[in-house]
Amino acid sequence: MFPAAFDYRAPASLDEALGLLAQQGDAAKVMAGGQSLIPLLKLRFAQPGMVVDIGRMRGLTGVSRNDGWITIGALTRHVDLERSYDLPGQLSMLPEAAHWIADPLVRNQGTIGGSICHADPSGDWGSVVLALGADLVARSANGERVIHAADFFQGPFTTALGPDEILTEIRVASSSKPAGGAYNKLERKVGDFATVAVAVQVELDGGKVSRAGIGLTSVGATNIKATEAEKSLVGREPNDAVIAEAARLAAAAAEPKTDVRGSAEFKRDVVRVFVQRGLKTALARAKEARV
């Protein structure tokens, strides 16, 4: 099937792109790497009047440290994060999660911002930013606003972004405390969407957990933040019993459905196992991490 006809623009600057969105409103769709939007266009699930291609714009890529934040440009490609061996220790989850995304073709073309904005509940980056407690920075012609990751995902393929806004960066608060993360994913074959995946992030202070983040993939209508499981870890020494309780609470937060990939009970138990495994890996990495 061929896409319906649309106007195509490739603005040279962010301001030009924002001007187009302000003019077009809901009639326009933003395209970054195109790995999500192009299939929707070909199947005519999306029929915008205009596609605004920002994939070649400069200034929205890379990882940097500024004013207490670690900032990831929204147009940073998956492969660049996969190969970022010099990331701060607290972002050890990023290369691991990037490696699990689809296949080399998608990883070379797709962007972290595009994936987050697509808001597929089976998408990997949604759970990662939830676990990291990230802030998502959106720009429009009227200015900038910051959306916490926990408030960004509002439903399947639905976000808090307005039709005139572009996600420009992902911000993670820089910490002087030891921190580490892990991403575990179960898929039917290489490159498949997750049957279940779990992102885990921990921060330590004097042998106790000072902050914990847990994001769940493919077990609900959106990526899920396992809030009660996170709370159960904070202020406690992470022994086996504490980890097992957090895993139980995370599994209880999951809302999986039975399908060709497995039963709801199976998926919920995979969440439990992956949270246990992820916490142990993240804790080990936190103890070894360089800040």
Image (cartoon, rainbow, N blue to C red):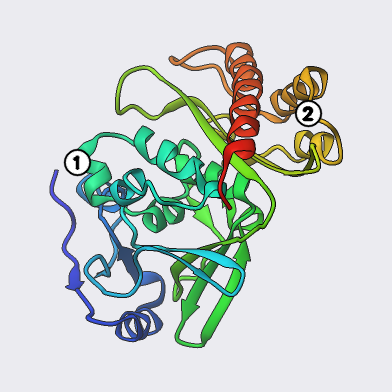
Q: Element under label 1? A: helix
- The alpha-carbon separation of the residues under discs 1 and 2 comes to 39 Å
Q: Mark 1: few, some, or many residues within 10 Å (few <14, many ≥20)?
A: few
Tell me the residue that label 2 is attached to. 238
In this view, the residue farthest toward the left is 2
In this view, the residue farthest toward the right is 235
Can you tell which mark lies on residue 105? 1
Residue at x-position 30% and y-position 51%? 80
Q: Looking at the picture, which amino acid does disc 1 mark?
A: Leu
Residue at x-position 62% and y-position 17%? 273
Residue 145 lies left or right of residue 94; in this view the side is: right
Q: Where residue 220 appears, x then y in whole percent?
A: 59, 33
Instruction: Reply above or below: 238 against 11.
Output: above
Earlier residue among tags 1 and 2: 1
Q: Looking at the picture, which amino acid does disc 2 mark?
A: Pro
Residue at x-position 21% and y-position 69%? 56
The reply to whether residue 30 is in sight is: yes
Viewer-nearest residue: 252 or 63 = 63
Q: Element under label 2? A: loop
The reply to whether residue 221 is in sight is: no
Q: Where residue 241 appears, x then y in whole percent?
A: 82, 18
* Quadrant of the frame with the N terminus: top left
Q: Where residue 261 appears, x then y in whole percent?
A: 45, 16
